[in-house]
Each structure stands twice: as C-alpha cells, then as structure tokens.
Image (spheres, rainbow, N blue to C red):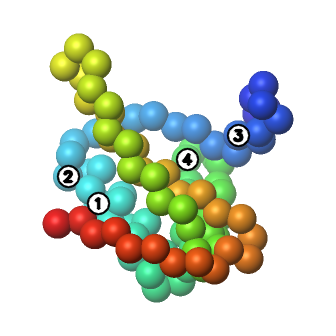
Amino acid sequence: MMTNSNTNKLMKHEERMSRQQAAAILESVARKLKEKGSFTINIGDQSQTIEPAESVKLEIELEEKNGEYELEFELEWKAGDSTQGQISIE
C-alpha cells in the first residue's frame, strides 16, 4: 500500500474495543520491547515484526474536536539510532 509522499504503509488497522483491551495490547507491546527489543503484529492474514533501533523518537499527541478525543503514541527511528531522552508517565 503506497501513499502520495513515497511512504510505504505496511499496515493500518482500526478496531473498537474496551479500554481494558486497548491497555492490554499496549502493555504487551511495552513488555515485548523491554524483553526482546521487538514485537509482532498479527492482523488477520497479515503479520509484521517490528524491531525498532535502540533509540527511538516518541511522539505523544492529544487532540479534541467537538467533544471527540484522539490520543496517539508514535515511535519513529532510523537504523542505528542511539541517542536517549527522558519522559515519564504517571
């Protein structure tokens, strides 16, 4: 799947689920990244293994429009990235 900006979109999926189910998925991603440095997303017959560089750029975005909220967590990296930053969630 190609987009107009020469970006190769490897996967896209949206699904309504409970807050608890969403939290479990995020916890699983976090655990796998900590333990193995990678995780695999399986959606239907699609599968993609994600193995970020040692250093990633984390973007957190919260938007509100007409009472509808959207929270995005985005990781970006290039092969060989190794710088580190500080952020905390309470």
Quarter containing the N terminus? top right
Q: Please indicate, yes or no, whether residue 71 appears anywhere in the rendered image.
A: yes
What amino acid type should be assigned to the residue bearing mark 2? Gln
Other-residue count near label 3 (Cα within 10 Å), few / some / many at <14 / 14–19 / ≥20: few
Farthest residue, direction bottom: 35
Kindly identify the amino acid type of the residue bearing the numbered disc 1.
Answer: Ala
**Structural distance between the alpha carbons of marks 4 and 1:** 16 Å
Question: Mark 2 vs mark 4: which is more N-terminal?
Answer: 2
Distance between the alpha carbons at the discs numbered 2 and 4 = 19 Å
- Viewer can see residue 32: no
Q: Which mark is residue 20?
A: 2
Question: Residue drawn at (30%, 50%), measured in percent from left and top?
Answer: 22
- Residue 69, percent across and down? 26, 29
The image shows a total of numbered marks equal to: 4
Callout 2–callout 1 Cβ contact below 8 Å: yes
Q: Is residue 29 above or below residue 54?
A: above
What residue is disc 1 on? 24
Amino acid type indicated by mark 4: Ile
Under circle 2, the secondary element is helix
Instruction: First in sequence, mark 4 or 3: give its number.
Output: 3
Q: Which mark is residue 43?
A: 4
Q: With respect to residue 5, does 8 lie above or below?
A: below
Q: Nearer the viewer, mark 2 or mark 3?
A: 3
> In the rendered structure, which amino acid carries the disc numbered 3?
Lys
Q: Are marks 4 and 1 in contact (CB under 8 Å)?
A: no
Q: Residue furthest right?
A: 6
Left or right, 29 with reference to 50: left
SS for dot 4:
strand
**Nearer the observer, disc 2 or disc 4?**
2
Q: Position of residue 37 (x, y in %)?
A: 55, 79
Q: CA distance from mark 2 to mark 3?
A: 28 Å
Q: Mark 3 = which residue?
A: 9
